[in-house]
Structures are given as C-alpha cells and as structure tokens.
Image (cartoon, grey):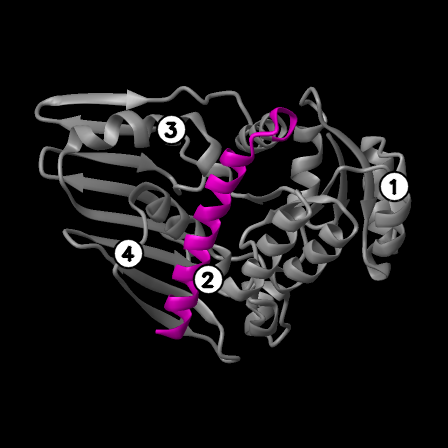
Amino acid sequence: MKIGIIGTGKIVSEVIPVIQEIDGITIVAICSRSHSRQKADWLAAEFSIGEVYDDYDLMLRKSDIDFVYVALANNAHFSYALKALDHGKHVIIEKPICTSTSELDALIQKSLANHLYIFEAVTLLHMPHFKILKEELLRQVGNIKLIVCNYSQRSSRYDLYLNNQITPAFDPACFGGALTDINIYNIQFVVALCGMPVEVEYHPNIGHNGIDTSGVAILHYPHFKAVCIGAKDSDGLSYGSIQGEDGWIENEGPVSRLEKFKIYVGEQESEIDVQRHVHRLRFEFEHFRDIYHSGDDKMMRYYLDLSHQVMTVLDLLRAS
C-alpha cells in the first residue's frame, strides 16, 4: 500500500512517523501547495520520503502510489479527492470527509464506478475500545436514556481570530468552526453507536465573522437524547458519558481518543484500558491496510455509509 500525501499541516507531521512503523504501508511522496513547499521539503528530509511535489497533478501522473491521503483545509477535501479518483487512486480523507452530502455522493459514485476505495480518517471508529464498547458493554447498561459528549479545547489560533487574523479553522469559507472541526468527533461517536437520529438541532455561539466558535448539538432519538458539546473558544472538561437504565459508562477525556473508560453496573465498577502504549492513529491505518489488501469492499462500504450518515447529520445541524 503506497501512499502519497497532499498537505503539510499538523496532522501530517503527526501521522507520518506512525505510518512509517506499520508493515505493508509506504509513504512514497508528499505534495504541498506552492507556498508550503519549504515545509514539504523539510518533512521529506526529516522522514526520508523520496518524492516531493508542489504540483498535485504531476504527483498523480508520475508517482507510483495507490492512495492519496488528503490532509488539507476542510473545503478542499472534495476537489482533491475527486481528482485523485479521476487518476485511478484510492483516497484517505481527513475528517470531515466533505462539506455536504452532495459532495460525498459524487465521490461515492466515482469510486464505485472505478472500483476505488474511500476511507474517512475517523480514528475512534477503528480503536479496540470502540469495538468493546459497541459489541460488549453498551447492552450492559440497559436502555440508553442520555449520552453527553464534551470536547472543549481553546484553539491555539483563537487569539489570532480575536485579532481579525482568520485561519481556516475559523473561516466559514473553509468549512471551519466548532461543529465541523471538533464537535464532529462527538457526532461520529454517537451516530456510529446509535445510528441516525430522528431530529437534530444546533445552538452555536457565533463569532464576529459568523463562525461558530462553540456550540451544543442535540440529537433526538426515539427513546433518548444525545448532547454533543464542542468549543474552540474555551477550555473545559472533555469527556463522554452514556447513561442507561441499568448502569452508565464514563470516558475520560474526549471520545476522539477513547483512551480508557469505566462502566458502572449495579455496585460493580470495571475499567477498560487495553490501548496503552499504542498511538491512536495507528489503529485506523492498520485497518485501512487490511481492508485494502484483503479486498474487503463490504467493510469499506460499511465505514463509508457511516461517513454518509454523519455528513447528513452535519447538513441538518447546519441548516437548523
């Protein structure tokens, strides 16, 4: 599985050394936009990546890659992924996968017509802890009544924003904001566990340029409510909590990491902590590798359907 990366942001610097430790995956090339070429050259030198480009079309034509990993601003995901598919490349796309369900529908149509894979890089869905939670623990707490997820982290770019220096994370034109940049993890968590809600609503705090700097999304299910809180303008206690009629589950920290959690049923308390010493990004790329190498189209479609459900919820939340 040979990967070409498009992008040089923070997530790229973090993911490269993780991928390079995984058998069966090779980073062949990295591509940047022209203004970031120096950063791409540095990353290539630092991590011994053989090919560097500042021309995306050239990388797609020349480089011997199977996949393109799209790690650009949110609003660029669709166009760069579509171009990769047009060149016969599979794609791994950072969250959120697109800016609308209509964009995602176009990618899905293209990928199916050309027998290509699309993966959205949603780390938590591939973690052992998520599998244990969904397949073993959730039923132990009985009928769910409430889910609350809070991911609040004051952005390192928030002071720039307050001084009218708008970065993509706070730019409506880049599909930035708290809902799509940080609260999406909470929404992915809830939808992957519980399916599509019957109704949704979003209550944002709006900044000076119309962006949601923080907000509360409420997902209504037939017999319970899920509250998803995301903040880029303030710090807070990040956690996840699932309350059922027979017990409850507590996740320490944001659900995007699922580092460890506890389950309380009756007077019994158990702690789940089996992911220690493994980088959180490793799980998803190992799973992508296995799905690709085994040709497991059904599993790829399962995750793609989840991405579509989440994108539908985002559309509805933004419209609300």
Which class describes the residues within 10 Å of circle 4: few (<14), some (14-19), or many (20+)?
A: some
Query: What amino acid is labelled 3 in the image?
Result: Lys
N-terminal of the pair, mark 3 or mark 1, is: 1
**Dot placed on the residue nearer the N-terminal end, 4 or 1:** 1
Residue 269 lies in the magenta-colored region = no
- Which secondary structure, mark 4? loop
Number of the front mark, 2 or 4: 4
The residue closer to the viewer here, 100 or 174, is 100
Specify which label sits upstream in the sequence, 3 or 4: 3
Residue underneath mark 3: 131
User: Mark 3–mark 1 contact, CB under 8 Å?
Assistant: no
Q: Specify few, some or many for label 3: CA neighbours under 10 Å numbering under 14, 14-19, or 20 or more.
A: some
Q: Position of residue 180 (x, y in %)?
A: 48, 60
Disc 2 residue crowd, few under 14, some 14–19, many 20+, Cα 10 Å: many
The residue singled out by tag 2 in the image is 178
Left or right side of 32 for 215:
left
- The residue located at (39%, 57%) in the rendering is 230
| Quadrant into which the N terminus falls | top right
- Name of the residue lying farthest toward the front: 113
Label 1 SS: loop
The range drawn in magenta is 292-320
List x then y, in percent, for residue 94.
60, 49
Name the residue tied to disc 4: 197
Identify the amino acid type marked 4.
Pro
Q: Nearer the viewer, mark 2 or mark 3?
A: 3
Tag shown at residue 279: none
Neighbours of disc 1 within 10 Å: few (<14), some (14-19), many (20+) = some
Whether residue 238 appears in this view of the structure is: no
Which residue position is annotated with label 1? Answer: 63
* Secondary structure character of the magenta stretch overall: helix
